[in-house]
Image (tube, rainbow, N blue to C red):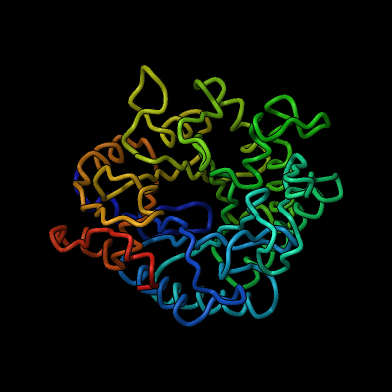
Amino acid sequence: MNDSQQLFQPFELGALTIPTRIVMAPMTRTFSPGGVPNAKVVEYYRKRAAAGVGLIITEGTTVNHCASNGYPNVPRFYGEDALNGWKQVVDAVHGAGGTIMPQLWHVGNVRRLGTEPDGTVPGYGPMEKFKDSKKIVHGMTQSDIDEVVAAFAQAAKDAKEIGMDGVEIHGAHGYLIDQFFWEGSNQRTDNYGGSMANRGRFAVEIIQAVRAAVGPEFPIVFRFSQWKQQDYTARLAQNPDELKEFLQPLVDAGVDIFHCSTRRFWEPEFAGSELNLAGWTRKLTGKPTITVGSVGLDGSEFTSFMTNTTEIAQPASLDGLLSRFAAQEFDLVAVGRALLVDPDWAAKVRDGKQEDILPFSRSALGSLS
């Protein structure tokens, strides 16, 4: 069947059943003062689950490390107060019939001095950086690496204990894990730098520690991207062989699902094939994949909405997406801006009411709706 009802079939992974193939993509929302999800955050996620989103992947939520946060009012995933807030989110999403996973996040060298919770702490990254004789990035020692690995593991353990359905590890978009992947940001000469295998070691150790903390059945999603915030034309892997070399250690470490972040889901990843990044990842690893990238919207660049603009992204046909889904190019579909602006997006797609879907504009970023 080549229609939207394909997206409303369940997906099973071990003991986990996701009721529909629609995933809410993680999108940073700065509405958690003190890092604690509040009643507005609870309702924000509940409404989307109630409207037919099968899996909520939360906004990035920081692990318990002094330099993990890079922005004001983003939620954290440590401390009794924050975990109690997330427990309310979990219960609300489950009560609405959905499933939910936190995206565990460390921003790395993106952090700037002055950022909460302790403004004296600089960014942490693979390499030390100075500006005007002031250290703005602390180059991570082995002890620092071990602390961050342990923080991810503890967050995953806490996620399981409060009833989350799995965890997503944020390894994309130029944040800490991704900074280790790249030769440009990682010129270390120890076991964490040099070859692709060495540059991937930090991620592998995090995945292994998370797996040890949660056991063999708890789902681990890993989000990665070829592009970076700093360079949208960048590529970690130039061809399928390099992509296989990058992904296989992550599979061996314990990843269950890959969340393959692209700017436009319809763009081929490599010459000579129409497969997108999720399609290639599924083909090369045999693991389920989530596709993402301007689903349900026209080609308006999401980056343009990060500055003052009157641009509007209009709803777009899902025909191309559905054709790829029917061909089993990917297993799940993550929706970002379309779901951010319209909590009923999934229900409108399901019920054939696409004409009622709301367009996306910058004003949608100003509140939780």
Residue ID at (74%, 42%): 129
Q: Quadrant of the C terminus?
A: bottom left
Q: Quadrant of the N terminus?
A: top left
Residue ID at (44%, 30%): 280
The answer to whether 336 is drawn above or below residue 274 in the figure is below
Q: Nearer the viewer, residue 29 or 206?
A: 29
Residue 333 in the image: state x and y as whole percent. Answer: 37, 49
Q: How many marks?
A: 0
The answer to whether 316 is drawn above or below residue 235 in the figure is below
Residue positioned most to the front: 132
Q: Is residue 317 left or right of residue 119?
A: left
Work out whether residue 10 can be spotted.
Answer: no
Q: Nearer the viewer, residue 186 or 63?
A: 186
The answer to whether 167 is drawn above or below residue 234 in the figure is below
Q: Is residue 342 left or right of residue 332?
A: left
Residue ID at (40%, 58%): 24
Residue positioned most to the bottom: 39
Residue 97 in the image: state x and y as whole percent. Answer: 39, 71
Residue 180 in the image: state x and y as whole percent. Answer: 68, 38
Work out whether residue 37 can be spotted.
Answer: yes
Q: Nearer the viewer, residue 309 or 196?
A: 309
Residue 364 in the image: state x and y as whole percent. Answer: 33, 65
Q: Is residue 71 left or right of residue 109?
A: left
Residue ID at (60%, 73%): 35
